[in-house]
Amino acid sequence: MAVVAAGRVLRLGGRWSAAASGGPSAQRAIAYLFPSGLFDKRARPMMKHPSEIFPEQRKIQWGEDGRPFHFLFYTGKQSYYSLMHETYEKLLNVQKHQDQLVAQGFSLQKEKKNLVGSRWLTKTELEGMLLEKLSDDDYSRFIRLLEKLMTLPCSDIEENYIKKFSKEIAVQLQKVSTEPLKYDEQGVAFSTGEGVRKTSRATAVVYDNGTGKITVNGIDILRYFPVLQDREQLLFPFQFLDRVGKHDAICTVSGGGRSSQAGAIRLATAKALRSFVTETEVEFMRQAGLLTVDPRVRERKKPGQEGARRKFTWKKR
Amino acid sequence: MRGRRGRAAALPGSGGGRGGSGKFGSSSSSSATEMAVPRILRAAAPRLYSGLPAPAALTAAAARPRDPEDKLLAEPLRHPDFFKVKNLFTLKDLFDARVHLGHKKGCRHQFMKPYIFGCRLDQDIIDLDQTMQHLQLALNFTAHVAYRKGIILFVSRNRQFCHLVESTARECGEYAHTRYWQGGLLTNAHIQFGPGIRLPDLLIFLSSLNNVFEPHVAIRDAAKMNIPTVGVVDTNCNPCLITYPIPGNDDSPTAMELYCKLFKMTIIHAKNKRKQIEVFQELQSRQKGDTSRPVVAEGQA
């Protein structure tokens, strides 16, 4: 329409009379004169789906004669209270069943179910399920009732009902699998491990059928670590597993100072020894702290202080 | 509230039956706004609605379609015990259900004195003869309300019987409220629930005290909103604002089960009676419709 109007305006000039006479190509030719994003496809408003804007709401709660549909309508929170009513009914059911079993003479045993992989619905999820606002008190009351139902011995009858309100959480499994032993040309079993401590990085190869000889960067530990403390650190994994003279170790280490290198090699040898040892002993090692990376790193120096923590000398005047 | 029933009973006899009974007939099935008018105005200016003599032609023409409805609603009011409520229970049933046991002398409410038979070892005993009468009146009233398709709300704040009361209400197709009573439920209903809501026509209290042993707020609110109440009053309760008090025990499980059973039976019985009479009237009208046609009518259903 703008183009047609413009065409009329330009009829005065001779050169543009082609556009004035009309025709789609002519209109397209002069469209650049009237840039308007209004009719562009990309200028159309982006709208959400109506179900996102208008969330699911309660429809009218009573019929033509004015009588409400739900028997707990006049309480105000009909979904929540009917849920409580239902759950309490299941509880009474279970108790009745228990009484019957006791009357018949069976003993009741509760097998402890491992609840690690499941959690109850959160308050928001429950609100979404009931389409009703809940208060924290209401929610906690409901969860308490569910827990009470769970603790009863015969609650297996109502398992389906309880499952509606529990969700499974993906249990993050740790890497329990240890690497298998490798064998070199002579048929001797060996295993590798890596360790870090502060800025040191170490790798250790632990061989079976050994005499307890440990080499670091091609040098014997007695030469490489003159201080007793460092050598004690290296031998700790073997001593913990009572395998002091049974393994040989060839280690490489770089970075850091003497103590941190010793710690890195200790972690590397401990990791390597996992393959030689049973699962329970691996668990003992883990609990002893042999397999944990020491997270302590050098703290930075802050401005206005002499060191990381040390402040400048405070002078009264 | 009793006056309302009395007035309604008198209306079909009077000349201007259209105005009075029409209002009464529509009041139980229309929305709250229409219902409010007869209650409030009736209380304020009873003579306005006593029915004026109208011209014969008009009454005849207008009364014809309402005739069966009038009969339906007016018929039960002619009998003192239309629903035979007296046959539902005996004094022995009340005694076996321990309805006569009250609280200790120290808990006694002053206004419950007329209903108490005596006191044994400091425990009050409720007079079961009076309980019988009151219970019959209350059940009769409930039956009439249920017959007229009124909304009945069971209220009880006793946690021990919360589930029982809710189940009773659900089974007879009525409503229950055994939870925390929000302040404006009856008095502020249009804002809390939405416009066009219909309030209950009868409140039945199976325990008239709340959790802190004070009279339930709903008794006062129902009195404010002109809603009749039926209530079981124990020796520590205040029977003042309750329209049909029933002096009796509200703490024993046997007593509560008895009350629930009785109310359930009356309501279901009254509803069935209504359906029965409606079906009967429909059959009658069909027969009449068939016979009034000049052409040979079809065979009866």
Image (cartoon, grey):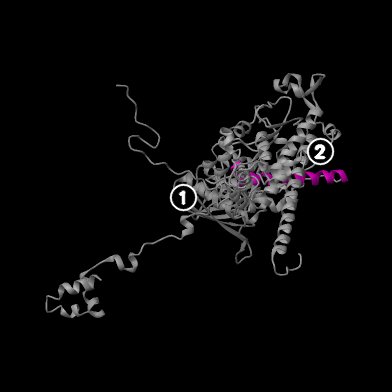
Instruction: Give the image quarter of residue A35.
Output: bottom left
Coordinates of residue B148 in the picture (x, y in percent): 68, 45
In this picture, which residue range is highlighted in magenta? Answer: A75-104
Residue at x 75% of width, y 49% of height:
B273
Coordinates of residue B14 in the picture (x, y in percent): 65, 41
Crowding around mark 1 (Cα neighbors within 10 Å: few <14, some 14 to 19, many 20+) is: many
| Mark 2 → mark 1, Cα distance in angstroms | 96 Å
Crowding around mark 2 (Cα neighbors within 10 Å: few <14, some 14 to 19, many 20+) is: some
Residue identifier under label 2: B86
Residue at x 78% of width, y 39% of height:
B81
Kind of residue indicated by mark 1: Ser
Is residue A77 part of the magenta span, yes or no? yes
Q: Is residue A12 above or below residue A316?
A: below
Q: Nearer the viewer, residue B172 or B182?
A: B172
Q: Nearer the viewer, residue B52 or B12?
A: B52
**Can residue A88 be seen in this snapshot?**
no
Instruction: Give the image quarter of residue A77.
Output: top right
Q: Secondary structure at mark 1?
A: strand
Coordinates of residue B84 in the picture (x, y in percent): 80, 41
Q: Is residue B119 left or right of residue B216?
A: right
Q: Is residue A61 above or below residue B185?
A: below
Q: Nearer the viewer, residue B86 or A296?
A: B86
Q: Secondary structure at mark 2?
A: helix
Coordinates of residue B244 in the picture (x, y in percent): 70, 32
Kind of residue indicated by mark 2: Lys
Mark 2 vs mark 1, foreground winner is 2
Residue identifier under label 1: A200
The residue sitting at the front extreme is B56
Q: Are marks 2 and 1 in contact (CB under 8 Å)?
A: no
